[in-house]
């Protein structure tokens, strides 16, 4: 099987319904019954309802050791799919909501990475992420915690959440703070916002990658610019299909971005919510877009080249 690497996956969004229920049973968290459908899967209708379901599921992660368990379980599943490296988003806002400090949530994740490396020979790193719809003040608090508490496994800063809220310029102070401290950044743009949302991100923020970016496809000049500037795209086809942006893998423009010369990577985003996994994404895109082994190896190579970890680790993984 082709070796894989993943750059865009939200850690709290990797926990399966079974793991969420197990954690809640262990720590006494009250799970909102509306979190799950009658078949046991996560219940949500559209992207905004997904964000709310995500919040409800994340509320079951209530300790450092819960974060360790979520991280370990995800990396275990990834290792079974021949994944070499995962760069996962973590959300200190979700941790804080569940009563876990910034440093405790990172220490838990780091323990999960260490345990998974020992047991499955997989490597992981963290991109600390703010939530756009919580506003620039909360983002700045996270950027400050980030720069005041350097952690060996934290390699970058990112932003997710509702792209329709606020403007990228509102988050410039937060992004500039971490960038000035020597870290790379990425922002979700061009998922539920159009090409203008990607342009606004590129104009305002010191990003070295774009989260999603798929709606650049509506603006050929922007696609050309992304290719020329070699800005890697964290594409998440299964996520886009699950949230209704595209009908199916056949109509998803993944291959168009490749053919336009963009640096594409393939990612699962929130796998149990979107009925996918990184391995399934490789399989499904390969089939629908008629990719051969060399194409898939290029996708993995792109991810390792675009990863925010140090060069020494990249070389070891390649
Ligand atoms: C997201 Cl804040 C957040 N969490 C999980 N998945 C996301 N996609 C976009 N924003
Ligand atoms: Zn995402």
Image: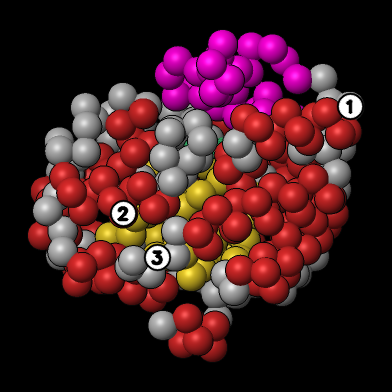
The answer to whether 50 is drawn above or below residue 187 in the figure is above
Q: CA distance from mark 3 to mark 2?
A: 8 Å
Q: 272 left or right of 111?
A: left
Secondary structure beneath dot 2 equals: helix
Q: Measuring 19% from the left and 72% from the top, which residue is drawn there?
A: 294
According to the picture, the residue beneath numbered tag 2 turns out to be 282
Viewport quadrant of the C terminus: bottom left
**Dot 3 surroundings within 10 Å: few (below 14), some, or many (20 or more)?**
many
Mark 3 Cβ and ligand 2 under 8 Å apart? no
Residue at 24 percent of width and 49 percent of height? 285
List the residue tagged with mark 3: 4
CB within 8 Å, label 3 to label 2: yes
Q: Is residue 293 left or right of residue 4?
A: left
**Kind of element beneath mark 3:** strand
Indicate whether 305 appears above or below 291.
below
Q: Please identify the quadrant where the N terminus is shown.
A: bottom left
CA distance separating discs 3 and 1 = 36 Å
Spatial CA span between label 2 and label 1: 37 Å
Q: Is residue 114 magenta?
A: no
- Answer with mark 3 or mark 1, whichever residue precedes in sequence: 3
- What span is in magenta? 31-59
Q: Secondary structure at mark 1?
A: loop
Q: Position of residue 131 (x, y in %)?
A: 60, 39
**Location of residue 138 in the rendering, given as x and y in whole percent from the top left corner:** 70, 40
CA neighbours of label 2 inside 10 A, class few (<14), some (14 to 19), many (20+): many
Q: Is residue 125 above or below residue 199?
A: below
Does residue 143 appear anywhere in the picture?
no
**x and y, in percent, of residue 255 in the image:** 15, 52
Instruction: Indicate the colouring scheme.
Output: secondary structure
| Disc 1: which residue | 28
């Amino acid at each position: 099987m082709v070796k894989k690497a993943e750059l865009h996956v939200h850690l709290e969004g990797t926990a399966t319904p079974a793991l969420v229920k197990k954690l809640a049973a262990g720590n006494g968290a009250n799970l909102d019954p509306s979190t799950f459908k009658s078949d046991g899967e996560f219940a949500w209708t559209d992207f905004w309802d997904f964000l709310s379901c995500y919040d409800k599921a994340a509320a079951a992660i209530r300790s450092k050791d819960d974060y360790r368990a979520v991280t370990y379980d995800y990396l275990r599943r990834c290792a079974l799919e021949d994944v070499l490296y995962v760069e996962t988003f973590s959300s200190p806002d979700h941790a804080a909501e569940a009563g876990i400090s910034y440093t405790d949530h990172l220490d838990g994740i780091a323990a999960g990475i260490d345990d998974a490396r020992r047991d499955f020979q997989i490597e992981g790193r963290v991109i600390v992420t703010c939530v756009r719809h919580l506003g620039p003040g909360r983002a700045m608090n996270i950027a400050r915690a980030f720069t005041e508490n350097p952690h060996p496994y934290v390699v970058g800063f990112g932003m997710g959440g509702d792209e329709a809220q606020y403007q990228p310029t509102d988050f410039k102070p937060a992004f500039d703070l971490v960038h000035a401290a020597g870290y790379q950044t990425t922002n979700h743009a061009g998922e539920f916002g159009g090409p203008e949302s990607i342009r606004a991100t590129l104009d305002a923020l010191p990003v070295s990658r774009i989260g999603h970016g798929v709606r650049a496809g509506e603006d050929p000049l922007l696609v050309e610019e992304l290719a020329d500037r070699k800005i890697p795209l964290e594409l998440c086809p299964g996520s886009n299909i699950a949230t209704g942006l595209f009908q199916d893998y056949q109509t998803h423009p993944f291959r168009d971005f490749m053919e336009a010369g963009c640096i594409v990577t393939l990612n699962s985003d929130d796998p149990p919510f979107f009925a996918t996994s990184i391995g399934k994404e490789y399989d499904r895109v390969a089939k629908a877009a008629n990719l051969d082994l060399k194409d898939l190896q290029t996708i993995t190579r792109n991810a390792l080249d675009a990863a925010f970890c140090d060069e020494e680790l990249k070389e070891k993984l390649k």
